[in-house]
Image (cartoon, rainbow, N blue to C red):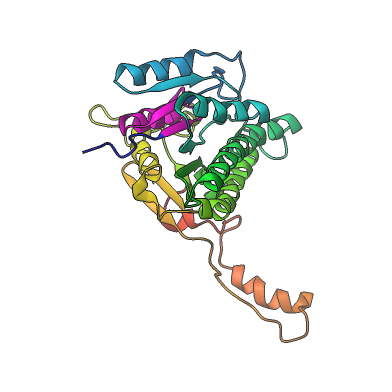
Amino acid sequence: MPLPLAGLSAIVTGAGRGLGRAEALELARLGAAVVVNDYGQPGRDGSGAASAGPAEQVAAEIRAAGGTAVPHTGDVSDFAQAGELVESAITAFGKLDILVNNAGILRDRMVFSMTEDEWDSVIRVHLKGHFNTTRFAAAHWRQRAKAAAGGAVYGRIVNTSSEAFLAGSAGQPNYAAAKGGIVGLTTSTALALAKYGVTANVICPRARTRMTEDVFAGLRKPDEGLDPLAPEHVAPLVGYLASPAAAGVNGQLLVVHGGMVAVLERPRVQAKFDSKQEAFTYDELDALLTPHYADRPPGETFAAAEVLGLRRK
């Protein structure tokens, strides 16, 4: 029986460590040829000199297991380098079929203390980085679709958001905003590319990585068995979303961790108020909305994560 991703090629960004590494290994295990992208900076805040080491190490690991992989060390937040990344997959494998966006950095600070650079750098790597690679991959698929007799090609995008966007994260306004933007980018892309045979979905993973070492510092790994927070719990979902079996999954947001996958709905109307006049007045809104929110804890968000019990610990 052929492997589900046999004959397909993939790019995984931020694949030198953590989630990206686990995802690259999983795609290769399922049969895909993989471009392992990682800029290789040692600091999770994007500090330190770039290095080819992490990407080369994971590519070598894939090849040692019998798979096909090439490293790429470009910076996805740079528009031109993201284009070169997509072109490298086309050059190496003849085409690109799967794009997994995972690269990111953290520069945490409360909103009243955050600097402009701390805001810009996180938005640039996460949100702009996702856009850059998506833009060039989408152009590749559109061009191929126009040349194809049936007008459709095989294309899969899996983007990475976070529960920080869902439930809020007080010390991460830049990160939460970037991750919310990625959801919007994904749903827009899903609508735009569906006619070409391309799907785009987004995951909110919870895993123990260099990025989350502070978040899960109080939750130690079990002495035996697989860590519930291991990136290996997330990778199979990425493999599935990248596969032909997921052709009917498009524009979806899925939360995944510890052997659990939750499919989230789009926000729904919780309550609706109609003015008895031509337009609302302040007094009328006060009479309607103030009682509605009276029993809610201060600062409670609208997030579906509250209902699912998925708030970041």
Q: Residue furthest front?
A: 149
Q: Which one is in front, 313 or 21?
A: 21
- Is 32 colored magenta in this rendering? yes
Relative to 174, does residue 210 appear above or below in the rendering? above
Answer above or below: position of 31 versus 256. Answer: above
Q: Position of residue 182 (x, y in %)?
A: 58, 45
Left or right placement of residue 205 versus residue 259 in this view: right
Residue 30 lies, in percent from the top left, at 31, 34
Q: Quadrant of the image for the N terminus?
A: top left
Tell me what residue is drawn at x 47 percent, y 48 percent.
311
Q: Residue at x 73, y 29 (%)?
A: 117
Q: Residue at x 59, y 30 (%)?
A: 106
- Spot occupied by residue 237 in the image (x, y as percentages of width and height): 37, 43
* Image vertical order of residue 224 relative to residue 153, above or below: above
Counting the numbered discs, the total is 0
| Residue 139 drawn above or below residue 16 | below
Front-lying residue, 4 or 44: 4
The answer to whether residue 70 is left or right of residue 133 is left
Region of the chain picked out in magenta, as a range:
9-35
Residue 185 in view (yes/no)? yes
Q: Is 20 contained in the magenta span?
A: yes
The answer to whether residue 171 is seen in the rendering is no
Give the x, y percent position of residue 268. 53, 66
Quadrant (top left, top right, bottom left, bottom right) of the C terminus = top left
Question: Outermost residue toward the left?
Answer: 1
286 lies left or right of 300: right
The residue depicted at 47 percent of the width and 17 percent of the height is 54
